Image: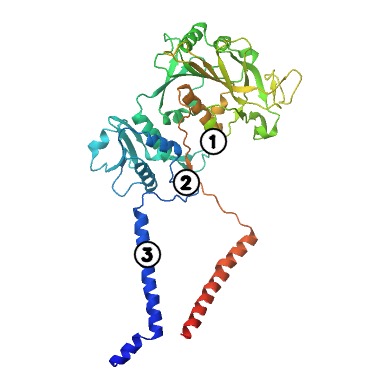
Amino acid sequence: MKKNSILESLQNRKFRFGGYATLLIIAGLAVVIVINVLVDKIPGKLDLTQNKIFSLSDETYKVLDALKGDVTITTVARTGNDDPTVATILAKYAARSGHIKLANVDPEKNPGWTRQYDTSGQGLSPGTLVVASGKTFKTIGPYDMYNYDTSNPNQQPQLTSLSVEQRVTSALLFVTAARNVTLYVLQGHGEQTLESLGMSTAVGNENYASKSLTLLTAAGVPDDADVLLILAPKTDLSTQDADKVRAYLARGGRAVILFNVMTKENELPNLAGVLQSYGVAVRNVVVVEGDQNRVAAQQPLWIIPTLEYHDILAPLRTNNYDVVLPYAQAVQTLALKKRTLKIEPLLSSSSNSWGKTDIAHAKTAAKASGDLPGPFALAVAVTDPAPDASKKDTKLIVVGDVQFLAQLFTSQVPGNADFFMNSLGWLRGQKESISIRPKNLQTMRLSLSNLQSLLYSGLVVIILPLLVLGTGFAVWMRRRHL
């Protein structure tokens, strides 16, 4: 081919058009590659998952922003074998705070390192997290970062939710706390326990240390008691036990007192006397809710109470959480009480409710003669101000129910456990306790009608291919005339 012919072909209009198109394709590919490289380097990425699995809550951000010392979060696993979901969430912690340091330790190569954090002596399972600040540490097992549904014994446990943030943020609070809060759980009168209610894990996750207390053998409520729990005693406190509780409260003590259904046959006069000192009484009245919009599962004795305005309930209002109280009794504010007492209702029934006065012999929940008209307070917060600033105020939470903490309710109604944990936070002077919910991992399925399925199938199988074919044909026809 002659030189002039080659030059003429290079100057041909079709060649120039094709060259421009090739350059545009190369430039487009270069832009895509550069964007991917830049996006991969950006620490903050959008979380497009349905339940924001990879996003941290405002509560966690507050904890991270308040950190004063360094905290190291170490993943115990061989390099490359760590859980990618957990690793992504931990990277969010490190990106938010310079005090968070991430590390990885291979247990096979560093058995001595893992041994110092193995308090059980059974070894640290691969995937375990060790959160440490100085000499204080807390371990989080790989199975503690996920929640499973074990309600059906005939099926394998079903993965339901992710609780990595809940566990890690709790561990951060634990290792950076000057002192953890101690709960004393009263025993010796047929009381419930945190374990029997299924609340021990929730309490432990928020770094409360719980201890049993038998006043028969103790001189009194210990001085290191931050909160005393009295969980629905079946028999009354002795006069001596009641005096020890009263002495503890008088020196600025804090207590949660929950009740089971009482009748005239199992009244608790000594415990009632303690409450009377603080202007309240739990009545032998089981509340029935007449407003169908305020009952759960169409059970008039399972009340969805009104949330009053209080620091304890502010987080529940923010998250639109309800509380369900089954078989609750009325909590009455006494007419004769100390003038300085501050008694605040927390949970209340509606004006359409009534109180069954003879629950032991009642055959139906329907309103009968002798029943008392509502509304009723079902839970109250009591504050008895200290005489001077050098002493602590006495604070009590009194709830005419204990069954709301049973696992049947706390597993289905998030507000129940949150109400209890927020009450503990208020008693120790914290307006809101850290309440981080696990991230639901159950997939929401898209349900389509037959007509919708047909339309979408036609769009994907027929219309879109025809559009692509028509566009290609139009481009081909245009290029024929160039």
Residue 89 location (% of width, % of height): 39, 44
Residue 362 location (% of width, % of height): 71, 21
> Which residue is painted at 35% across and 61% down in the image?
34
What's under tag 3, amino acid-wise?
Val
Residue 318 is marked as: 1
Residue 220 location (% of width, % of height): 43, 10
Q: Residue furthest top?
A: 239
Q: Nearer the viewer, mark 3 or mark 2?
A: 3
Q: Nearer the viewer, mark 1 or mark 3?
A: 3
> Which residue is painted at 34% across and 85% down in the image?
10
- Disc 3 and disc 2: Cα gap in Å? 29 Å
Q: Is residue 206 visible?
A: yes
User: Are the residues tagged 3 and 2 within 8 Å (C-beta)?
Assistant: no
The secondary element bearing badge 1 is classed as helix
What's under tag 1, amino acid-wise?
Thr
| Between discs 3 and 2, the one toward the N terminus | 3
Q: Is residue 370 above or below residue 77?
A: above
The secondary element bearing badge 3 is classed as helix
Q: Mark 2: few, some, or many residues within 10 Å (few <14, many ≥20)?
A: few
| Between discs 1 and 3, the one toward the N terminus | 3
> Which residue is painted at 37% across and 42% down in the image?
96
Q: Mark 1: few, some, or many residues within 10 Å (few <14, many ≥20)?
A: few
Q: Quadrant of residue 203?
A: top left
In this figure, which residue is indicated by the disc labeled 3?
31
Q: Quadrant of the N terminus?
A: bottom left
Residue 77 location (% of width, % of height): 30, 44
> Which residue is painted at 72% across and 23% down in the image?
363
In this figure, which residue is indicated by the disc labeled 2?
52
Q: Nearer the viewer, mark 1 or mark 2?
A: 1
- Disc 1 and disc 3: Cα gap in Å? 44 Å
Residue 14 is marked as: none
Marker count (numbered): 3
